[in-house]
Amino acid sequence: GQQLNQSPQSMFIQEGEDVSMNCTSSSIFNTWLWYKQDPGEGPVLLIALYKAGELTPNGRLTAQFGITRKDSFLNISASIPSDVGIYFCAGQGAGGTSYGKLTFGQGTILTVHP
Amino acid sequence: NAGVTQTPKFQVLKTGQSMTLQCAQDMNHEYMSWYRQDPGMGLRLIHYSVGAGITDQGEVPNGYNVSRSTTEDFPLRLLSAAPSQTSVYFCASSYGPSYEQYFGPGTRLTVT
């Protein structure tokens, strides 16, 4: 099946620093999604990307759909304590057999020190 | 508008017992799915449905059954629970797999 590698697995940063994380796939994706999960909750969508090369902001967050369609990046600028959580990338593959199947990365655990 | 609801929130089973995890949504979404979340593994797709009467397997379907008789409900059945099924289970719904998925609060299942 399709594999998503997300890195880094965890990050410990100071408040105010910028954060970057990325996901790479062994195959092409048509859609990339970035979610955040708070403890004890289900994931919540941050940004959705539907077109290769697309760069989409959401406040202090910016996500990019890689040109090769095999990778995506999420950047957080000027981090604040409430950014703490687990960030997941997710992708839907190209091709008929991939329809309906969303694949998630392993997650990046973000800790922000005030 | 309750969104996606899941019951129960916590459950402990003995090996071999069966149970059904309930999931319901009131957003008239056609697409519903079940994931399990294990430490370091992210969310893995168990089964999904693109509409009432249509279901298909995801990445880790073994040991689980689903059915979709209505648009609103998508129950997940464990026929004979095993310790390897200890996990947190999330149900999600959306207009389609490429659209924002709305997740329920999760069910934490422990099999002893």
Image (cartoon, helix red, strand yellow):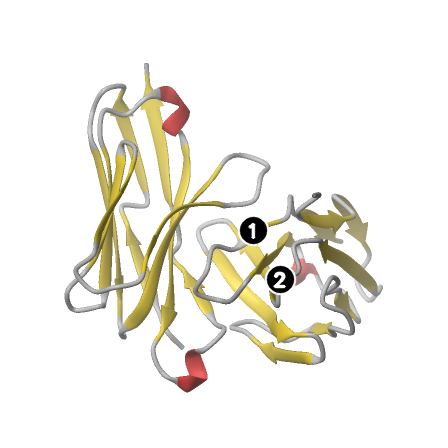
**In this rendering, is residue A98 above or below B72?**
below
**In this rendering, is residue B111 above or below A110?**
below
Chain where mark 1 sits = B
Chain where mark 2 sits = B
Q: What element carries label 2?
A: loop
**Residue at image x 15%, y 65%?**
A67
Q: Residues under labels 1 and 2: Cα distance? A: 10 Å
Q: What element carries label 1?
A: strand
Among the 4 quarters of the image, the one containing residue B28: bottom right
How far across and how far down the image is residue A66, in percent?
A: 18, 60
**Residue at image x 60%, y 79%?**
B56
Q: Which of A21 and A78 is in front in this view?
A: A78
Q: Name the residue under label 2.
A: B29
Q: Residues within 10 Å of mark 2 (few under 14, many from 20)?
A: some
Does the residue at mark 1 contact the one at mark 2 (Cβ under 8 Å)?
yes
The residue under label 1 is which amino acid type? Tyr
Residue positioned most to the top: A114
How far across and how far down the image is residue B72, in percent?
A: 73, 62
Q: Mark 1 points at which residue?
A: B102
How far across and how far down the image is residue B49, in percent?
A: 62, 73
**Does A86 sit left or right of B108 as displayed?**
left
Q: Nearer the viewer, residue A3 or B4?
A: B4
The residue under label 2 is which amino acid type? His
Q: Which of marks 1 and 2 is nearer the N terminus?
A: 2
Give the number of the mark in front: 1 or 2: 2
**Residue at image x 23%, y 24%?**
A78
Q: How crowded is mark 1: few (under 14 residues within 10 Å), some or many (20 or more)?
A: many
